Amino acid sequence: MTRHPTQFQAATDVADDTAAQADAEAALLRRYAQGDAAAARLLAARLTPRLFGHAVRVLGDHAEAEDVAQDAMMRLWKIAPNWREGEAKVSTWLYRVVANLCTDRLRKRGTTGLEDVDEPADPAPSAESSLQQAARADALQLALDSLPERQRQAVVLRHIDGLANPEIAAILEIGIEAVESLTARGKRALKQALDGQKDALGFSDDR
Amino acid sequence: MEGLFEQARATPPEVPDALMARVLADAQAVQPTAPSSRWRDWLAVFGGLPALGGLVTATCVGFWIGLAPPAGLPDLGAAVFGVQSASDDGFESIAMTGFGWDIEEEL
C-alpha cells in the first residue's frame, strides 16, 4: 500500500495518517521482537516497497536498489529487540539507513553520473501516450542521475516519496533550511537537465 | 516537471518476489524466539492447556461418580459408611449379595 499525500489532502489528514501508520509499524516491530512470525511478513510488506522505490530512484539501478533494501531491512530485524519506542519512527529510521547506504554506493561509483546526460534515451517517434510516458519516465531518471547525491536524495524524498521537510531533515541529518536549499537547487538542476534533454530529443510539447 | 513527479509517484517500481523472499528469510533467521517459561514447558509435556482441561474434567467426573454413583454401579462409599436404606437389613448388604453378582438359586 503506497500512500502519497497529494496537494488535495488536508494537512491534518496527512498527520493523522502518518501518526497511525507509525504506531502500527512500531507495534508490529515489537511483536516481531517477541517472536511473532506474522509480524515479520506484515512489516516487510509495508516497508520494503517504499525503501526499494526510493533506492531505485536515487541509485538509478534495480540490482543495487535490491541490495540496499535488503541491507536496510536486515538492520531493522537485528535492532528489533533493542528498539526504543517513542523515539524515531520506524520508517524515518529506515529511510536514514537507506540514505546512508545509497550515499556510500554513490561515492564508491566515484562520479555523480554527469556523463549519463550525454546519452539520451531513444526519442519517441510517434505521439502514442504510452511511448511518451515511457520516454518521460526515463527522462526523469536520467535527469535525477545527473544531480549531485545530496540534491538527488532530497528531491526524491520530497517529490517522489512525498515526505515533509522536517522528516527529510531527520533522515538526512541536516537542518530544515538545508533541506529547503537542497530541494530548491535540486529542482533547478532537474529543470536544466530536462530542458537539455528536450533540446537533444526534440520534444515539441510544453512542460 | 510536477507532471513527471506525479507520474513517478503513481508508478512505483514493484518489489521483485525474490527480494521479498530474501527479506523474509533474513527476518526469520535473526528473529528472537518466543520467550519460554517453565510452567509452559510442563504444560507442553501434558499436551498443552486444552489437554490439561480434559485431565481436570476427567478427574472431577471420576470423583463425582465415586461420591454419588448412578444406579447400577457399586457404591463403595455407601458400604463403608453404612448408609441406611429400607432394603438393607443385614442379609441383603452388598457384601452378602455378592456386589450385585449374586445368582438366584433355582430350586
Image: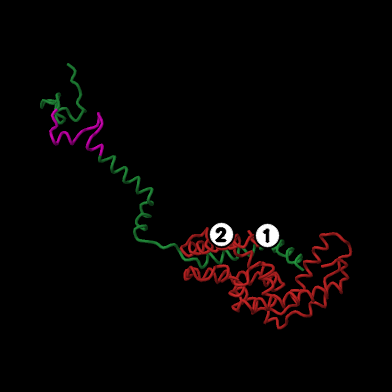
Chain colours: A red, B green
In the image, B44 versus A99, the foreground residue is: A99
Provide the chain ID for the residue under circle 1.
A
The circle on residue A42 is 2
Quadrant of residue A193 within the rendered picture: bottom right
Quadrant of residue A98 within the rendered picture: bottom right
Q: Is residue B79 magenta?
A: yes
Q: Residue at x 58, y 70 (%)?
A: A92
Q: Residue at x 48, y 61 (%)?
A: A31
Q: CA distance from mark 2 to mark 1?
A: 29 Å
Q: Position of residue B100 (x, y in %)?
A: 21, 28
Q: Position of residue B104 (x, y in %)?
A: 19, 21
Type of amino acid under label 1: Phe
Crowdedness near tag 2: few (<14), some (14–19) or many (≥20) residues, C-alpha within 10 Å: some
Q: Residue at x 23, y 38 (%)?
A: B66
The mark tally for this picture is 2
Q: Position of residue B82 (x, y in %)?
A: 12, 33
In the image, A62 versus A56, the foreground residue is: A56
The circle on residue A8 is 1
Q: Residue at x 52, y 66 (%)?
A: B29
Q: In the picture shown, does residue A180 fall above or below B51?
A: below
Find the residue positioned furthest to the left: B90
The circle on residue B36 is none
- Image quarter where the N terminus of chain B lies is bottom right
Provide the residue span drawn in magenta.
B64-84
> Left or right: A118 with respect to A151?
right
SS for tag 1?
Answer: loop
Nearer to us: label 2 or label 1: 1
Type of amino acid under label 2: Leu
> Left or right: A34 with respect to A17?
left
